[in-house]
Structure formats: structure tokens, C-alpha cells
Amino acid sequence: MTPATVAACGETWDASVMAALCDYVRIPNVSSAYDSAWRANGHMTRAAELLRDWCAAQPVAGMTIDLLMDETLSPLLVIEIEPHKTSRTDTVLLYGHLDKQPEMTGWRDGLGPWEPVIEDGKLYGRGGADDGYSVFASLTAVAVAQREGRPHARCVILIEASEESGSIDLPSWLGIVGDRLGDPSLVICLDSGCLDYERMWVTTSLRGLADGVLRVEVLTEGVHSGDASGVVPSSFRITRALLDRVEDSPTGSILLPELHADIPPHRAGEARDTAAEFPEPISGHFPFSGSTSAMTTDAAEQLLNRTWRPTLSVTGADGLPPTDRAGNVLRPHTSLRLSFRLPPTCDSSRALEAIRRALTADPPHGATVSFSDTHAADGWNAPAPDEWLTAALDAASTAAFGRGARNFGEGGSIPFMGMLGERFPRAQFVITGVLGPGSNAHGPNEFMHIETAKRLTAAMSMVLSAHAERP
């Protein structure tokens, strides 16, 4: 466990990973929820094959690689690696995904979602940090451990292709390949974030998710607004009234009790400790426009709001023409994509049903209201780590970054973690990642901080050996 490990991982990144990762960024393999023709387009298969081929060329002993295809499911990459220099029979499961979010508008000049650009130590482009780098980092961590003569247990690297669609294909795949996972004693996921680029951040909780399309119809076709307004109710006004049933618009607080959960005292303390260490609240990471201010200035409350309190975001709309094409027409319908983030311990199915009831019951003016194309995914709250793991994470972060590891709750969702928590209740979990300040996952100008990715790879290599050597 020396700086040589950091150097070795960095050398692999420079010699091999960066070129392959740039090629991956160039592939517009948008997740199936956003591309109904993804199979015909072939981008997902091309991305999966690129990752498979890179992995097959790596000097890893005892490795087998399967790229699994199914006519009803997105691809799944499964890599199995025999144990090295240890007699332990347990398994480490390393997880990532290769599908991507849509392009999004607003990329600055010289950048784009499908054109990799390396600038100021950052790789710009869609999917590099979320989560294309994960397979490269995982296999490099194993390869460097072997090269340095360090032990690791049996490893299974699982790279799915539907995470950005709520991991809709993963339950079916687990039914097919579940026996190959064994009974993991350690799960490592590289699909999370970090609050700075100065150390390894370990995610202790993830929010759940409930979403769907709210559609309000008042007419079968648009009519002249001067003729109809005041007689025909506005679909937008009705939509506003329905949203007021679930959200307090002045504060953003969610009104449905089914979407709330008690915050464990140790998680609240964790947020206070993290907030106290940093010179500014996390709101300083975001590109606010003009004089826009954060919903709260309290640093600890910001952390709790993004991890343990439910929120609503309107992420899309139909029925609204662009402003430069908006004639004097009372529109026949308004549709909004609603995305609710849920506390880690909230029952997402129960929350989704409460949302549906609140939005569709007794609609104003008898309008036709539906809430469809829904999805729900439970969040995840980490089990208490074993002493060996706490010590290993701190030692690995110190060796790789020069600073000890820190914990925090993540505001995003990784549906697979909830599935794994139920399936493997005795496993230890390390959820981490490179999505730090300004990296803007899912948005324009998304980037991966290259040095952080290299150092995190080294830290994971060290954790693998600590797991094999634990008491």
C-alpha cells in the first residue's frame, strides 16, 4: 500500500483507459426510457462491445468475460475473476452502468455530449463520469493488485445498461445470472459522487424515486383564446392546482405524509459534521442565475434536504409550443413529467400510489386527468460498516489522496443498491464516485475529474486487498 499503487493506476489510465473512455463518450447510447428505438439504433450494443473488448485486452489472471444479450433486455456485461493469493471463498461484487442520459441543451461553445474534450484536467462529455469510467476503474484496480502481488477475493464486475431508466432490466437479469454472483461479502459501486476532489467520499444513503407524467385535458383541440378563455378552464391552471395538492409552492415542501421518513439521528449528525468541515455550503457548487438564492442558507440543512427530505422537480413538458410559435390559442392539454426524490427509507410504491391519488381524485372542472408512465424505486440506507472496512477506507483514501475518507448522503438514486440490500443483507457496501462540484451529471457540460478517477481507482485496489486480508 504505497504511492506506487497510485502511480500504477495512473499509468494504466494514461496508457489505455483515457483513449477507450473517449471512444465511449462518442457513442450516443441513451438509456431506453429516452430512446424507444435504442435497439434498432445499435448504440447500446456498440458501447457494450467497446467495454468488453477493452476488458478482454487487460492483463488480468483468471478472468472470464460474458456480454449477455437478450431480445427483451438491454445488454449486461459480466466479468468474473478468480481469487488471487487468498484462500477466501467469498465474493466482491463491483457494479456500474453503461447507459447514458439524453443530450440536454446548454452545452457551452466547444463542448457537446458526444464529443470528448479534455480541458483543465477534466474529461467533458456525456457518460464519462456517469458511469462509463466504472468498468475501467474496477478492472484496473484488480489488475494493479495482481501486478503488485497483493491478494483479492473472487470478483464479479456487473455492468448493466438500464440504470438511467430505473434499472428496469436488472431484476430479470438477476434472475438469469444471480447464481454467478455468489453471496458477496463486499459490494463496491462507483456510480455516486463526492463533495470535493480532495479525498474519497463514501455514500451512506441514496434517495428513492417516484415519477410519472401528469396530463390534464380540457378540449379535444385548441381553440381561439379570445373566444374561449373565461369559459373553458385553462389546463395549465388546473395543473397548477393539482400540483398544489402535493407541494407547497412557496417553500417546496412536499405535503403528502407517505413521501416522508424520519431522519435517523446519526445521519443528521453526519450532515452537521460534514457541513462544519467545509468553508461554504454545497449551494456554492451550483450555477445560480442572477440573484437566485438557495432554498436555505444553513449548510447542514442543505445536506439533509438533498438526502433525507422529499422533493419535486418538473423535468419535462408537452402541450406547450415554443414561445416564438405560441399563437393566441387556449391549449387543449398540458402534460408534465414529475420526478419525486424520496427519503432513503421511504416505501416508493406506497409513495407513488399516494401521488396518483392526490393528483387524479376529483379534478377541478371535471377535467380529464391521468398520471401515467410511472416508475418507483426504493432508496438505500447503508448498514453500519465493520471495523476493518472503516479502517481500510480511511487508509486507502489517505494513501491515494493524502486525506482520510469522509461519509455523506447522496441525493441521487441507484436502484440496484436497494435490490442488493434486500438480496444480500450481510454484505458490506462501499458506494463512491467521481461526480463532484461542477461535474453536472445529466446536465450540460458534464465532466469527469481525471485525477480523482485515477486516485479512486488506486483506493479501490487497496480496499480489495484489505478485504482479502481482513480478520
Image (spheres, grey):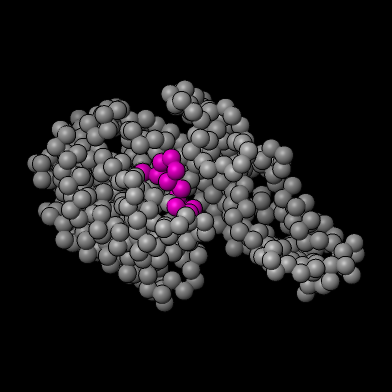
Magenta-colored span: 434-445
Q: Is residue 303 above or below residue 23?
A: above
Residue 291 is situated, as x and y percent measured from the top left of the image, at 63, 38
On the rendered image, what quadrant is the C terminus found in? top left
Give the left or right position of residue 392, taking residue 275 as reference.
left
- Is residue 171 among what the camera can see? no
Tell me the chief SS of the magenta region: loop
Q: Where on the picture, by quarter, is residue 109?
A: bottom left
76 or 302, which lies in front?
Answer: 302
Q: Residue furthest bottom?
A: 40
Residue depicted at 61% across the width and 49% down the height: 313
Judged left or right of residue 188, residue 347 is right
Residue at position x 61%, y 59% in the image: 316
- Residue 283 colored in magenta in the image: no
**Relative to the observer, which residue lies in front, 268 or 25?**
25
Residue at 66 percent of width and 51 percent of height: 355
Quadrant (top left, top right, bottom left, bottom right) of the N terminus: top left
Along the viewing direction, whichever of 187 and 299 lies nearer the viewer: 299
How many labels were placed on the picture?
A: 0
Task: Where is residue 200? Give x, y as percent.
Answer: 33, 35
Can the viewer see residue 406?
Answer: yes
Q: Position of residue 321 (x, y in %)?
A: 68, 67
